Amino acid sequence: MLVEQRHWMTAEDFNAQLGMCQFLPGPNVVNLAVVVGKRYQGLPGAIVAPLGLLTGPVLIVLLLALVYDCYGALPQAQGLLRGIAAVGCGLLFAMAWRMGMAIQVKPVFWPFTVLTVSGIALLRWPMPLVMAAGLLLSGSVAYWTLGRK
Amino acid sequence: MILFELFLECALLSFVAFGGATALLPELHRVVVDHHHWLNDTTFTQLYAIAQAAPGPNVLVVTLIGWEIAGLAGALAATLAMCLPMSVLIYLLIDRWESFSGKRWQRAVSLGVAPLAVGLVFSGATLIATSAGLSPAGWILVAAVVLANLRFRELHPLWLIAAGAILGISGFA
């Protein structure tokens, strides 16, 4: 919409901004809306853009929540949600695979993926802790590899 | 007070959500189900499924979680807590961050965070898979979706979700 309909920004620009927002913590699209909103309209834009982006979907989700509260216990609904959860989890595995394949120097960085999975999924350590330690280690290694080139 | 606690937990989480809301699933689960016992395993997974099927960004799973825990106020508090802190920070820091682009340490951070994000997404997937109570047919569905999604990239995920919904109603998950 931003690129093709309104020509507010170029595709390269959009990709660069999106890449940055994906890397920063927080909901990607919301971050992107803030960045784009600020660029074009300053503070008001940065407030209005994420609000506009979220209001509709939040209302829909709340409506679904009401339906879930009324009918969620029905066996059909349980089956339906289990089917969707299975698909969602397949999509997540696929996404992890794709993200993993995009990593350069895999022998160096994949161990950090394994460490993250062990800490989060197996040992169930608090994520802020795991992320802080992981980022420190993995970031230092990355810093070092960048210096060698 | 539960509303305040919910807000605080979500706000704290928003700072480590590298890779977006998807990466947060394991930690959300740890906080909401294991630590506070606000929701049980099944409800958590079902809320995830609803967010997955609904249009809009996948952060909205926290809206649903907030709703189930504390009603409308909970839904708004959780959503706001998840979006606001980073939005404010990004608003303030974006220009500075852009001026850093290309610096060695900035490239090191973006390079270093990628394998961690992969681990987070993978952990989220395992968590959903194990707590959804899938039947053997459900596991086959998971595998089929992975293959379909990787093999046919043009295929929109909504088709897979629709297929999963139909299979699920018919008892094949």
Image: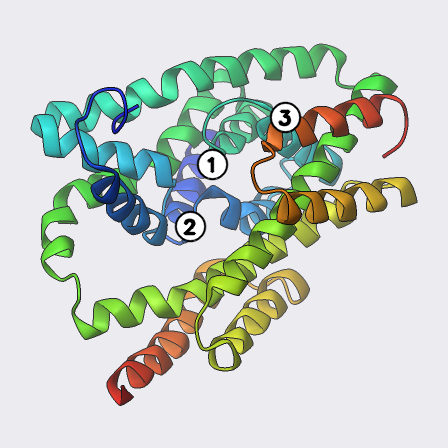
Q: In the picture, which quadrant includes the C terminus of chain B?
A: top right
**Residue B17 — which label?**
2
Comparing B163 with B1, the one in front is: B163
Please name the residue shown 84% across and 21% down the image. Answer: B169
- State the residue in front, B150 or B139: B150
Are callouts 1 and 3 both on one chain? yes
Q: How far apart are marks 1 and 3 (CA)?
A: 20 Å
Q: Name the residue under label 1.
A: B6
Q: Tag 2: residue type?
A: Ala
Q: Which residue is drawn at 47% across and 25% down?
A: B56
Q: Residue flagged by tag 3: what amino acid is it?
A: Ile
The vertical placement of A134 against B41, above or below, is below
Q: Which label lies toward us, 2 or 1?
A: 2
Q: Do the residues labelled 3 and 2 touch (CB within 8 Å)?
A: no
Query: The residue tagged with tag 1: helix, strand or loop?
Result: helix
Q: Residue B154 carries which label?
A: none
